[in-house]
Image (cartoon, grey):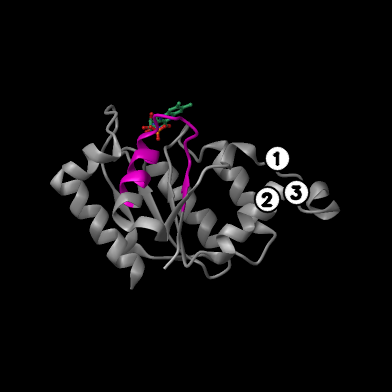
Amino acid sequence: MRILALCGSLRAQSTNLSLLTAAQELAGASLHIYRDLGALPHYNADVEEAGIPDPVAALRKYVRDASVVVISSPEYARGVPGSLKNALDWLVGGPEFYAKPYALWSASDRAVNVDAALRLTLDTMSGRRVEAGCLTVPLLGKRPTAAEILAAPAARRALEAALVALRT
Ligand SMILES: Cc1cc2nc3c(=O)[nH]c(=O)nc-3n(C[C@H](O)[C@H](O)[C@H](O)COP(=O)(O)O)c2cc1C
């Protein structure tokens, strides 16, 4: 089991990142949090045709090697944060995401539009959503550390159940 986790927020204090970090503490080395979303060039089909940039090749390799991809993302202006959408656009042209199991996580119970938008995009990219592995932990307005998330019984149980679902 190799879980690749993408965080749609670049904030150091991101609640989505805290959620993924909490999951990493439960899953150990089998979960890798990808941290280079902000280093990807803007998607450009001309650049892709001329040769895959190194950061994009690295992202594609992470996706290829993963048995499942987890995306935890905030909603920006009722949609997907640009840096995350940019990463997904770079994955459209490669075979790595095809039929890849994926789950959507959220640190906000208000983020319904980004959830719908990501489902549409990732289904269009022929990903295979693991519904039982999707979760929402309402952390909006809080700034919990990973340890604080794991100390909350409901959040911990939800994370553990999602990780079990992603393993099956
Ligand atoms: C530019 C921007 C736009 C946002 N737009 C929305 C929105 O449309 N809907 C919503 O529910 N929250 C919106 N929010 C609130 C974020 O989703 C919320 O702050 C989220 O918890 C941030 O996630 P993070 O802690 O992982 O960075 C917006 C925040 C920012 C900075």
Q: Is residue 40 magenta?
A: no
Rate crowding at label 2 as few (under 14), some (14 to 19) or many (20 or more) other CA atoms within 10 Å.
Answer: many
Give the magenta part as a residue range. Answer: 5-23
User: How far apart in space, not on screen, are marks 1 and 2 (Cα)?
Assistant: 8 Å
User: How far apart in space, not on screen, are marks 2 and 3 (Cα)?
Assistant: 5 Å
Which amino acid type corresponds to the residue marked 1 in the rendered image?
Answer: Pro
In the rendering, which numbered label is found on residue 53?
3
Q: Nearer the viewer, residue 119 or 167?
A: 167
Disc 3 element: loop
Query: Which residue has dot 1 on it?
Result: 41
Q: Earlier in the sequence, mark 1 or mark 3?
A: 1
In the rendering, which numbered label is found on residue 22?
none
Q: Quadrant of residue 162?
A: bottom left
Q: Contact (CB < 8 A) between labels 1 and 2?
A: yes
- Image quarter for ligand 1 equals top left
Q: Position of residue 137 (x, y in %)?
A: 26, 44
Tell me the residue at 29%/28% (across/down).
143
Q: Position of residue 41 (x, y in %)?
A: 70, 40
Q: Position of residue 47 (x, y in %)?
A: 81, 47
Q: Contact (CB < 8 A) between labels 2 and 3?
A: yes
> In the picture provided, is 50 more to the left or to the right than 10?
right
Q: Is residue 114 above or below residue 52?
A: above
Please state, as top left, top right, bottom left or bottom right, where the C terminus lies in the image. bottom left
Residue 44, can we see it? yes
> In the picture provided, is 119 more to the left or to the right than 49?
left
Query: Which residue has dot 2 on it?
Result: 56
